[in-house]
Amino acid sequence: MDTSPSYQVKLEVFQGPLDLLLFLIRKKKIDIHDIPIATITKEYLKYLNLKERINIDREAEFLLIAALLIYIKSQMLLPRERVLDEEKDPRQILVNRLLDYQKIKACSVLLKKKEDHELLKWKRTALPPILTEEELGFIEVSLFDLSESFFSLLKRREKKETTIITGKEVSLEEKMKEILKCLEKESSLDFLNYFYMQESLEEALVSFFGLLELIKSKTIIATQESPFQEIKIWLREKAYLKFN
């Protein structure tokens, strides 16, 4: 088998049926207001058989216009006593659509030229500098991200058996003090690990509310190196010393 590359010609693909009709009208040098329906219908159907020349995704639209052309042709063949007025001409509906399409196409070409011109005007002349690891720093985590991570943890814990200690009451103030004590001792806390170590879901919830209160009072801060990375909890003063 001969596998050598052959000469190929890339043909224009007509995006829609009106695009094809305008092409045929220009090709045949036809007056758009006086279309010979028999000629155009014949040429249109010929091109319709060349599947590679039309946008297959819009094939139904091509067939619809083909049906309209055949309908107009049948109306033109009917015997009449006098010449039809322009308003009653079966071709007028097609002429109106072609004229509207022609205007829209001209506008789209004009807008594309303006877009290209503006893109050149505001073209970026240099790429932004790439930050080093020392310059990257940490991102402060939003309350929405904290809540999403926390409730994802709760869903995982629901699938496991948990031991609930009855009669044990956990106050918000106690949990806030516990978080601060851990931060003074460990410097930072892993957000998910801390809540995963709580004895019950109730205790985890109280701890989470305590964490939110401390963030609200600007006592602690939640950070991560980049989106979807582990979340760390810091005392604000220690976080400032680490990141500066």
Image (spheres, helix red, strand yellow):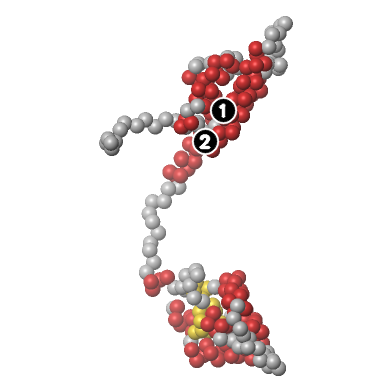
Q: Quadrant of residue 131?
A: bottom left
Quadrant placement of the N terminus: top left
Above or below residue 105? Residue 71 is above
Q: Are marks 1 and 2 in contact (CB under 8 Å)?
A: no
Name which residue lies at 53% across and 23% down. Answer: 45
Q: How many C-alpha atoms fall within 10 Å of the one at disc 2: few (<14), some, or many (≥20)?
A: some
User: Looking at this rendering, what residue extends furthest in the top direction?
Assistant: 81
Depth check: 200 or 214 in front? 200
What amino acid type is highlighted by mark number 1? Leu
Q: Earlier in the sequence, mark 1 or mark 2?
A: 1
Depth check: 156 or 114 in front? 156
Above or below residue 59? Residue 68 is above
Is 133 on the left-hand or right-hand side of 91?
Answer: left
Q: Which mark is residue 108?
A: none
Q: Is residue 234 visible?
A: no
Depth check: 193 or 179 in front? 193
User: Looking at this rendering, what residue extends furthest in the bottom direction?
Assistant: 167
- Which type of secondary structure does the marked residue at label 2 adopt? helix
Name which residue lies at 68% across and 12% down. Answer: 78
What amino acid type is highlighted by mark number 2? Ile
Above or below residue 57? Residue 64 is above
Would you name the residue on which mark 1 appears? 18
Q: CA distance from mark 1 to mark 2?
A: 15 Å
Q: How many C-alpha atoms fall within 10 Å of the one at disc 1: few (<14), some, or many (≥20)?
A: many
- Which type of secondary structure does the marked residue at label 1 adopt? helix
Q: Quadrant of residue 121?
A: top left
Q: Which mark is residue 56?
A: 2
